Image (cartoon, helix red, strand yellow):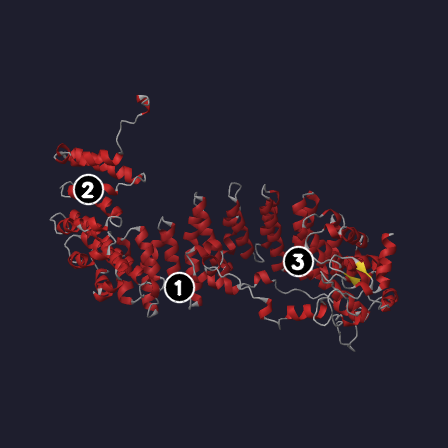
Amino acid sequence: MPPPTYFVDHKRGEVNELRGLLRNPKVTRDPEKQRDVTKKVIAYMTLGIDMSKLFSEMINLSHTKDLVIKKMIYLYLCSYATKKKDLAVLAINTLRKDAQDDDPMIRGLALRSLCSLKLPTIVEYVVPLLRSGIKDSSSYVRKTAAMGLARLYRISPETYNAGRWTQALHSMLTDREPAVAINALNTLNEVEEENGGVKPEAKTVVPLLKRVREFNEWNQCTILALAATYQPSNQQEMFGIMNHLDPLLKHSNCAVVLATTKVYLNFTRNLPKVHFSVIQRLKVPLLTLMSSSSEELSFTVISHLKILVSRAPDIFADDHKHFYCRYNDPACIKKIKQDVLVEIGSGKNASELINELSEYITDVSPEIARQAIRSIGKISVKIEDVVDEGIELLLSFLDLGTDYVTAETCVVLMDILRKFPDRYEDVIPSLQKVLQTVDASEGRCAVVWLIGEYGETIDDAPYILETLIDNYNDEQSSTVRTELLTATMKLFFKRPPELQKMLGRLLDQAISDSNQVDVRDQALFYYRLLRHDPHEAARIVNCEKVKVSNFAEAEDHEIRDQIFEEFNSLSAIYQMPSVKFTTYRPPEIKDPTEAPNSPTTSTASNTIASPLSSNNPAGTSPPITQIKTETPLEVKQTTAEVKKTVPPPAIDILASLADDTPVVVDNGGNQQQQQQALDPVGTRRCYVFEIPKSLLLTTKRITE
């Protein structure tokens, strides 16, 4: 039974339908119908339908005189020439004929299409047409020929080099038509890409700069990028070029202004006084562009301004109000504005800046509020005259009761006390109210550090540490654990009776921590240091506080210089050198078996014993004396006077550490007897640590 008629598709396929129309004599004689059919072919091709089967019909249609139809047909030929290489040769004669047409538009269109076929077989036909094209009377043909040379270089570099086309392109740079000159420059940049682009020579750069205003704004950026790599022969030439480019600083296009800025900065880089004056001249146009209503444009300009501010902050110090955050600024602009405010902070405006930054604490974005607190801290550390005012503001933030504000404030106060340790009397009393309410890991680290350094002035310091020690297993951050170890050790020498049992429990848990090796190693180091000599331990762990002169974050001059070298590029937007975001170097993974003498391997061989070694029969345990333990830390005795002596109670407590009976802690954290150090089955390895029994007994009594 035949299917119903409404299921039958009476419409033929698009390709067959169009083939019939292209072969129809009525269509070939009517230019309007030819145009409509050609539009359908291009439309189907744009939609992804394969129209390559119509290649022969489209070639026959290329003999038309209609320029619109020719453009569409040449577009079709360039698209499917690689699929129909044998038939594409048939179109060469038509294109060569059109390349000699009287109409310059047809000549240029045919030359562009012929160069775009991307077939090695057309090289011999293209070269004569390019030679006549670069000398054509029409500027459209000449600029098309200039771009055609770039396509010739892609198809056959040998033919390009043999034809000495580079010299021809250099002569075209002086062409009276700007479009021809800029196309020649773009082609030279592509051809010389491996060598860094066109060589910045005076005969190339100076003529282009003299007529730079004749080009459109994007072509001006290309010329200015070339000029930025050029070094004038003398100061007279340099000032002449800069005076000629001065009107471009008032251009409405941000790209032109930034490109001109780079030329000015590169010309005067080795002249400090002139360089300073140039930045002063660039300040006004850049600040004007920064106030644009476009957020993207404003962010781009501020990113580049930040580079200039870092090199000459005094120039922008009086214009700090331009960098105040507006309520409707996006977060990215608020962040970079705060960075600039920190850079331009000085004795004259520091007080006004930290008061302005304090207004951002209530921002809806927690990240902006955190950065505002950090910015206040940086200005306070940078300028000592406002440190008291900064501390007062930071302490007032603690009354807000916001978790992230409290945590960030503790971190900033820690940095201030590292730079100005004598200010602790103003900070510690106010911090006692919030020390137990900090939740963020960074804030907890700061709190623990403060307790370790100034615990003798905080009444509840041992009890705050006790809460953290009791919840040691719930703490996931290794940074907090290591800071807790250090703070407990420091406070132990200051208040030994209260910290004795806490220190024992903490060392027990930390040494049993097999997941975080750095924590375990630090705990072992502290234990062996205590067992060796309490006085030496006090001198090392509880040493005298040293003022921090400069923080590592502020000493990045090398990176700043690299970013300055890449001014007017993505490096300014990302605030990092291009090598960090344009290249990827996978880490080298070395096989441990190939480096038996590495420190990691040697340490493991000294601390781990395998029950399946060649010297022992399978299933038997070797004597305990065969297990090698790590050599105790040897601390050299010093005759120098210990600046911070150990209190007598601490010496009496540490005297009990003389009990050297070893205990074994396996990799699961369980205590075992010495004779069971190795699993009889021989299926796992055990880590052997020597812990005084008195320390473990003290812990046992506490837990009971």
Question: Picture coordinates of residue 643 (x, y %)?
Answer: 78, 70
Kindly give the residue lying farthest to the bottom in the view shown: 639
**Taking the image as drawn, is residue 449 in sight?**
no
**Is 666 rendered above or below residue 328?**
below
Residue 81 in the image, given as x and y percentages of width and height: 24, 49
Amino acid at pointer 1 = Asn
Labelled pair 3, 2 in contact (Cβ < 8 Å): no
Report whether 402 appears left or right of 143.
right
Query: For the residues marked 1 and 2, what is the alpha-carbon distance in whole angstroms?
Result: 54 Å
Q: Quadrant of residue 485?
A: bottom right
Q: Residue at x 26, y 60 (%)?
A: 153
Precedes in sequence: disc 3 or disc 1: 1
Mark 3 vs mark 2, foreground winner is 2
Query: Which mark's residue is nearer the viewer, 1 or 2?
Result: 2
Lower position in the chain sequence, tag 1 or tag 2: 2
Q: Which residue is mark 3?
A: 415
At horizontal 36% and vertical 49% (from top left) the residue drawn is 253
Report which residue position mark 2 lands on: 58
Q: Considering only order in the chain, which callout, 2 or 3, is on the residue closer to the N terminus?
A: 2
Task: Give the number of the disc on residue 42.
Answer: none
Q: Could you say which disc has been placed on residue 266 in the image?
A: 1
Q: Nearer the viewer, residue 216 or 122?
A: 122
Which of the two residues, 496 or 94, is positioned nearer the viewer here? 94
Q: Quadrant of the image for the N terminus? A: top left
Side of 358 where 675 appears, left or right: right
The image quarter containing residue 399 is top right
Distance, label 3 to label 2, CA atoms, is 75 Å
Q: Is residue 563 left or right of residue 497?
A: left
Q: Residues within 10 Å of mark 2 (few under 14, many from 20)?
A: many
